[in-house]
Amino acid sequence: MEEKIYDVFENMNKKLTVREASMLSPLQLAYIGDAVYELFIRTYLLERDLPVHELHKEAIKYVKAKAQSDIVHGLEDELTEEEKAIVKRGRNAKTYSSPKNADLIDYKYATGFESLIGFLYLTGRQERMMELFHKIILEYHQ
């Protein structure tokens, strides 16, 4: 068991090839992308020096499905063909749950956005990911 845990942490620094990442389902990419994006937003919001319950309220504004859907629509012209294909795969993925507080279309586009973030993270494209995060903060959340 201890070896398995060590292997997980050891593999966190290993980046996948584009082929390996493409073999993951869009929902697996979205699963990782959701965590990466939320961590980025939470870290960004710490600069505001707010009480934790206020930080949580602010974070929701950035990570809710409608916000992510708006972001991915706004970034459309900025994305490469490869990135657009990843978003499309995520958007079209068959989900087995229904959104609780979101329109289905926004939820699907949010899944596409999270798939893209997961893909960029897993393939080690931190510079591109940060470029998109910078644009998101400057253009969509001032």
Image: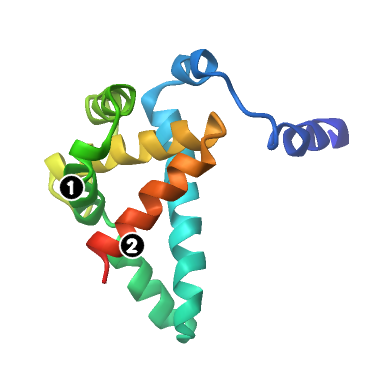
Point out which mark residue 74 bears.
Answer: 1
Q: Where is the N terminus found, in terms of image quarters?
A: top right
Instruction: Give the residue at mark 2.
Output: 137
- Which mark sits nearer the N-terminus, 1 or 2? 1
Point out which mark residue 105 bears.
Answer: none
Compared to residue 35, the image places residue 47 above or below, namely below
Q: Is residue 6 visible?
A: yes
- 53 sits to left or right of 92: right
- 7 sits to left or right of 121: right
Q: Where residue 40 sits in the image (x, y, percent)? A: 48, 58
Mark 1 burial class by Cα count in 10 Å: few <14, some 14-19, many 20+: some
- Label 1: which secondary element: helix
Mark 2 burial class by Cα count in 10 Å: few <14, some 14-19, many 20+: few
What is the spatial separation of the Cα atoms under label 1 and label 2, in whole angstroms?
12 Å
Residue at 39% over, 53% down:
133
**Quarter occupied by residue 109:** top left
Total number of numbered discs in the rendering: 2
**Quarter occupied by residue 41:** bottom left
Compared to residue 91, the image places residue 99 above or below, namely below
Compared to residue 106, the image places residue 82 above or below, namely above
Q: Where residue 71 sits in the image (x, y, percent)? A: 23, 50
Residue at 54% over, 32% down:
122
Q: Where residue 115 sits in the image (x, y, percent)? A: 37, 34
Q: Where is the C terminus found, in terms of image quarters?
A: bottom left
Residue type beneath disc 1 = Gly
Residue type beneath disc 2 = Ile
Q: Is residue 63 visible?
A: no
Residue 48 or 103: which is nearer the viewer?
48
